[in-house]
Amino acid sequence: MLQDNYINLGKTGIQISSIGIGIMQWGDFRIDPSDTELNKKILEIYQVVLASSINLFDTAEMYGNGKSELHLGDCLRQIPSDVVIATKFMPFPWRIAKGELRSALSRSLKRLGLSHVDLYQMHWPTPPVPIRSWMDAMADVVADGLIRAVGVSNYSVSQTRLAHEALAKHNITLASNQVRFSLLHQTPVRNGLLKLCNELGITIIAYSPLEKGILSGKYSSERLPTGYRSMFYNKNYLHKIAPLMEALKQIGQAHDEKTSAQVALNWLTCKGAVPIPGARDQHQARENAGGLGWQLTAGEIALLDRISEEVTE
């Protein structure tokens, strides 16, 4: 059965694409917001995403101190569209009052040029403010119509359960938990988070789904990445994961020449997660969208599961 391009965000009824786009890169500190060529490039990426079946844009106040939200707001003003906007609140240790969340949300809304956002997420479960208190603050802004749904990010199994229970007291469902999840990082599977979220009807949003491009297939032990990637993905590591990369390539060829990246993204959607890869240009945006509209077979999923387990243990 062909996979639908859209799913419900948790139990909210908000329809999101099975693959979204993460726009952390739009807030890169090296970027000059007055750079007209850059603004044009971002608008072109936005247009490609709109032309595909992708409707979920994920950003955060932390991405470039609001630059990512500003760029998205500019795109929305130039080409209004009925898309789903998700952003995040960072609970810095010095943010200790409930009102801090409302103030931060107000600034995010101003940058985005919106009266409300579809999904507002706690970026990290940072102390000292208890999770219950932040969920109470979330419930307040839901009641005021400033956000449609509540999400968390980087929450463990126990923290997710706690957030879910705290919101339930306000008759609000926890919509999502955004965590690192990929064929090279299956912690949500191994620690039971994916299982819990499936049981509670919470959507897993997967960041770093292509592991900084490693799962795209453009690197190998003979073709090493440069810059900061080289510190984490060295020759030995790329040699170790070569069987997985070969499997991605072979499976892609069997599905009308899908790329390794598209196979890796589709695997996540088959797990019930919503990957949010970034896109530095139109080509990457189009390639990401190619992960939609088709589905891996049960045998292919099992094969990738097995090889992933072998190369990442």
Image: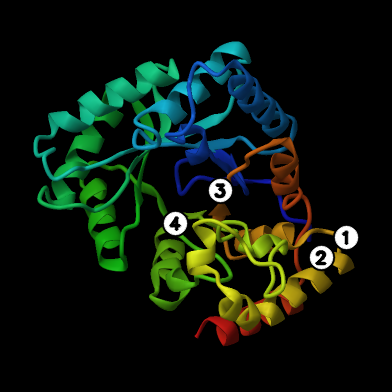
The reply to whether discs 1 and 2 touch (Cβ–Cβ < 8 Å) is yes
The residue at which mark 2 appears reads as: 252
From mark 1 to mark 2, how far is it between C-alphas?
A: 5 Å
Near mark 1 (Cα within 10 A), the count class, few <14, some 14-19 or many ≥20, is few
Helix, strand or loop status at disc 1: loop
Of the two numbered discs 4 and 1 in the rendering, the one whose residue sits closer to the viewer: 1
Question: For the residue marked with disc 1, what is the amino acid?
Answer: Glu
From mark 4 to mark 3, how far is it between C-alphas?
A: 19 Å
On screen, 29 above or below 254?
above
Residue at 60% across, 76% down: 235
Of the two numbered discs 4 and 2 in the rendering, the one whose residue sits closer to the viewer: 2
Residue at 18% across, 40% down: 136
Question: For the residue marked with disc 4, what is the amino acid?
Answer: Gly
Q: Position of residue 97 (x, y in %)?
A: 9, 35
Q: Position of residue 274 (x, y in %)?
A: 56, 52
From mark 4 to mark 1, how far is it between C-alphas?
A: 34 Å
Q: Position of residue 278 (x, y in %)?
A: 58, 44
User: 248 or 305, which is in the foreground?
Assistant: 248
The reply to whether discs 4 and 1 touch (Cβ–Cβ < 8 Å) is no
The residue at which mark 3 appears reads as: 276
- Which of pointers 3 and 2 lies earlier in the amino acid sequence? 2
Question: For the residue marked with disc 2, what is the amino acid?
Answer: Gly
Q: Position of residue 260 (x, y in %)?
A: 74, 63
From mark 4 to mark 2, how far is it between C-alphas?
A: 30 Å
Helix, strand or loop status at disc 2: helix
- Which of pointers 1 and 2 lies earlier in the amino acid sequence? 2
The residue at which mark 1 appears reads as: 257
From mark 3 to mark 2, how far is it between C-alphas?
A: 20 Å
Using the rendered view, name the quadrant where residue 246 is placed. bottom right
Of the two numbered discs 4 and 3 in the rendering, the one whose residue sits closer to the viewer: 3
Q: Give the position of the N terminus as an image quadrant.
A: bottom right
The residue at which mark 4 appears reads as: 201
